[in-house]
Amino acid sequence: MGNRTVKVVISGRVQGVGFRAWTRGEAARRGLSGHVRNRPDGTVEALLAGPSDAVEQMIAALRGGPVGARVTAVAVEAASEAPPAGFIILRG
């Protein structure tokens, strides 16, 4: 399988529950590159890039999120944005 890059927007109780740090850890564990950030509307946005199977596993993990989160929706779309090296948390 090839590589895939997607933008994911996660809705629900996803801010103030350690979602970004959890996402960074889960993405790094799967060897993915990209970033995660809180959005002003209360959602969390992630850019995920890497092997297609690892990206799919990460999307599945995002549907549950960390302890304390309550994910109500996960929207996924293809992205052409070049990911940063590694996986980082963006501020703002």
Image (cartoon, rainbow, N blue to C red):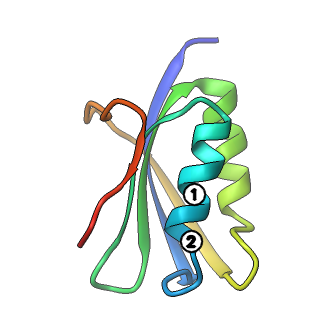
Where's residue 28, x and y in %? 58, 39
Where's residue 65, x and y in %? 69, 68
Image vertical order of residue 45 relative to residue 76, above or below: below
- Residue at image location 67% in from the left, 82% down from the top: 69
Q: Which residue is mark 2?
A: 19
| Mark-to-mark CA distance, 1 and 2 | 6 Å
Query: Mark 1 and 2 residues: CB-CB less than 8 Å, in contact?
Result: yes
Q: Which mark is residue 23?
A: 1
Image vertical order of residue 46 relative to residue 53, above or below: below
Mark 1, secondary structure of its residue: helix
Closer to the camera in the image, 36 or 74: 36
Q: Amino acid at mark 2?
A: Phe
- Residue at image location 64% in from the left, 11% down from the top: 1
In the visual, does 8 lie left or right of 54? left
Where's residue 14, x and y in %? 55, 80
- Residue at image location 44% in from the left, 41% down from the top: 6
Image vertical order of residue 55 relative to residue 19, above or below: above
